[in-house]
Amino acid sequence: MKFYIISRSDDLSNRLMKEAREYLEDFGMEWNEESPQIVLSIGGDGTLLHAFHKYSDRLDAVAFVGIHTGHLGFYADWKPIEIEKLVLAIAKKEFEVIEYPLLEVTVHYRSDQESSTYLALNESTVKSPDVTLVMDVFLNDSHFERFRGDGLCMSTPSGSTAYNKALGGAIIHPSLPAMQLTEMASINNRVFRTVGSPLVLPSHHRCTLLPVKAPDFMVTIDHLQLLHKDVESIEYRVAKEKVRFARFRAFPFWRRVHDSFIDSELSED
């Protein structure tokens, strides 16, 4: 089996990476950065996001597993003291692969420039560089609302616990193929109105944002911040591709939610 390891590059993460590589190579596994079958992410959820985007063009062939060297994460659920146990499980191939939905983001331009398409593991946000964001929101081909405010966020189910949650969005189980649109400080008064609530959209729906004023926008794809100019529309849909995680033991999603947001100390006793 081919493997690769991505580290957050702090001392602990680098030490664990060195240990894990030596163990796995001792078991006859091949270190291969170009085409690994399993990728270990050592750090936190941010490190795994980097790993995901590094291999976003071959998601059907690679499975990810995370070791956290800081706080417990939704994608990094192994502890540093468990590194030998994890390596043994990988070497014996004692794991199953589970799949989570992803978000497809396509930016179309007014000019002849070719459209840009991205995959997001957590979310994509849209903001105006210097003024209030004004966007017409279409659900499928029907106009839904004209949004005015700081910005909009479209998240995946697994990303619903990240920025989406901070915006007041719902937490969605990642077994559901859906995407969720949440508002950032929308303007609501007697003149301007938005729905004011998060929208959970099924996989057969698409959401299209059409600029009303300025055509330039800051678009984030997970941790990546991109300035797009001369935008005609931004289209969101649940991606056909899925991210694959190697699971070696049961760690239910709602337990992750509990441990991360409610009472992690008691849950470990």
Image: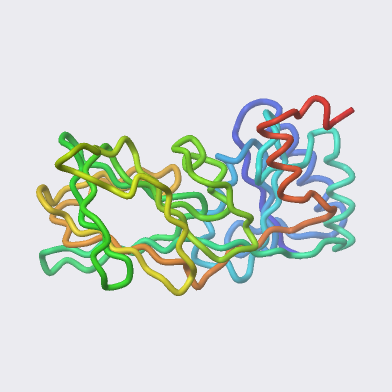
Which residue sits at x=10%, y=49%? 213
In the depicted view, which residue is nearer to us: 239 or 172? 172
In the depicted view, which residue is nearer to us: 91 or 30? 91
Q: Is residue 33 left or right of residue 22?
A: left
Which residue sits at x=79%, y=39%? 19
- Residue 74 picture location, percent across and down: 66, 43
Q: Quadrant of the C terminus?
A: top right
Please tell me in which quadrant of the rendered image residue 264 appears. Answer: top right
Q: Quadrant of the N terminus?
A: bottom right
Which residue sits at x=37%, y=61%? 105
The image shows residue 29, relative to residue 22, as above or below, that is below
- Residue 179 picture location, percent across and down: 47, 59
| Count of numbered marks | 0
Q: Residue furthest front?
A: 190
Q: Is residue 17 left or right of residue 226?
A: right
- Residue 16 picture location, percent across and down: 75, 36
Which residue sits at x=24%, y=38%? 188
- Residue 42 picture location, percent across and down: 67, 40
In the depicted view, which residue is nearer to us: 197 or 96? 197
In the depicted view, which residue is nearer to us: 205 or 229? 205
